[in-house]
């Protein structure tokens, strides 16, 4: 498949991809390392918490979106990372047995002022569960090489 | 200062919550699982990227901040429990704004994290308040590598 460059991201385009099954093991594995709170670690303890059962760390959901983005388009694009994330909102709990997918809307695309070989593409990502409920949204800019720059590279 | 209850916080107070070295192994392990882009996995690909070398996923540097916040808070809970004090219900995070990956975190870098209380507000539910924190990560040379604003629910005293 052809590599995706800056020019391939058209504002207004909406694409869906990914199918990530969420297991209790994956929730606990992430939480042990990065967010060891009882409602991310232990189903029993989680039942007594405000969330009423085991849920994924919000940072885990963000990491799962990152993985879907890599597999869904970034790793066949000329992406060069990004400066950060404008907004990340956790709307609903993510629980064992959920299946997550991503919806990407391209909001805007412009050339970099300081680096002529790079374009800035602004995306809105929505993470949906199996009931088509939006569990997380994320808005961020990605640096993506322009086609002429990419094709000139060795 | 990070505290246990909503009322234990004070706008403007900063707490250093801890530091973490980012080893090559940890950078690559995180990337393999969650962010397998070439510049987070491989030295040669990192050198050829805008970053100029292998560097940690930004989600890795942010997730480590979460870990250190949790460790700090759990230690406070343990200390309060040892004193026989009541423990608040744990609240959840609501979201993050202005997450910035300011400069790359490379193998061997040590990032020190701190959080400052930015805002406090009561909610319609008397048992919960919302606290906003500005989190910052600085590497061993004093360069800022990460910052973000996060807000979440904190239990109020007496409810």
Image (tube, helix red, strand yellow):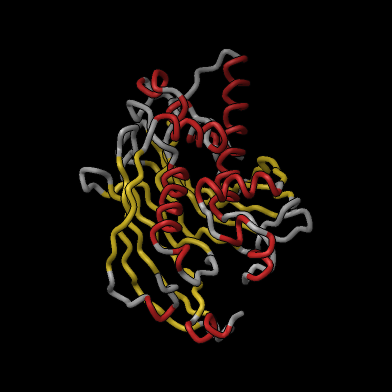
Q: Position of residue A69 (x, y in %)?
A: 42, 58
Decide: is A15 above or below A24: below
Residue drawn where x is 46% and y is 69% of the image: A77
Q: Residue at x 34, y 30 (%)?
A: A51
* Residue B135 in view here: yes
To which quarter of the image does residue B77 belong?
top right
Looking at this rendering, what residue extends furthest in the right direction? B141
Residue B96 at x, y percent in the picture: 45, 52
What quarter of the picture does the N terminus of chain A occupy?
Answer: bottom left
Answer with left or right where residue B156 lies relative to residue B4. Answer: left
Between residue B90 and residue A153, name the one nearer to us.
Answer: A153
Q: Residue furthest left?
A: A131
Instruction: Pinpoint residue B71: horizontal percent, then vertical percent.
Output: 61, 32
* Residue B105 appears left or right of A139: right
The count of marks equals 0
Q: Position of residue B6 (x, y in %)?
A: 48, 35
Q: Residue at x 53, y 80 (%)?
A: A150
The C terminus of chain A, quarter of image: bottom right
Q: Is residue B119 visible?
A: no
Going 50% across and 48% down the picture, which residue do you hit? B34
Residue B122, compared with residue B80, is above or below; it is below
Residue nearest the viewer, comparing A85 with A71:
A71
State left or right for residue B17 relative to residue B140. Answer: left
């Amino acid at each position: 498949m052809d590599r995706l460059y800056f020019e391939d991201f058209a504002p207004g385009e909406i694409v869906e991809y990914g199918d990530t099954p969420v297991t209790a093991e994956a929730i606990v594995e992430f939480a042990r390392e990065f967010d060891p709170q009882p409602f991310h670690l232990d189903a029993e303890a989680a039942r007594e918490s405000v969330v009423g059962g085991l849920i994924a760390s919000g940072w885990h959901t963000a990491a799962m979106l990152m993985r879907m983005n890599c597999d869904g388009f970034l790793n066949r694009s000329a992406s060069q990372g990004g400066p950060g994330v404008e907004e990340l909102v956790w709307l609903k709990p993510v629980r064992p047995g959920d299946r997550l997918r991503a919806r990407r809307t391209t909001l805007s695309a412009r050339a970099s002022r300081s680096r002529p070989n790079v374009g800035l593409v602004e995306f809105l990502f929505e993470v949906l569960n199996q009931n088509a409920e939006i569990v997380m949204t994320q808005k961020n800019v990605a640096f993506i090489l322009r086609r002429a720059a990419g094709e000139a590279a060795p | 200062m990070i505290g246990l209850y909503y009322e234990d916080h004070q706008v403007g107070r900063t707490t250093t919550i801890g530091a973490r070295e980012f080893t090559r192994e940890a950078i690559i392990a995180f990337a393999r699982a969650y962010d397998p882009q070439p510049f987070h996995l491989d030295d040669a690909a990192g050198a050829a990227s805008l970053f100029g070398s292998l560097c940690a996923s930004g989600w890795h540097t942010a997730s480590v901040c979460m870990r250190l916040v949790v460790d700090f808070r759990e230690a406070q809970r343990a200390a309060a429990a040892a004193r026989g004090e009541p423990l608040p219900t744990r609240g959840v995070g609501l979201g993050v704004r202005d997450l910035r990956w300011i400069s790359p975190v490379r193998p061997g870098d040590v990032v020190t994290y701190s959080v400052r209380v930015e805002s406090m507000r009561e909610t319609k539910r008397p048992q919960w308040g919302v606290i906003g924190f500005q989190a910052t990560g600085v590497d061993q040379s004093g360069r800022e590598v990460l910052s973000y604003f996060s807000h979440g629910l904190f239990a109020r005293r007496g409810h």
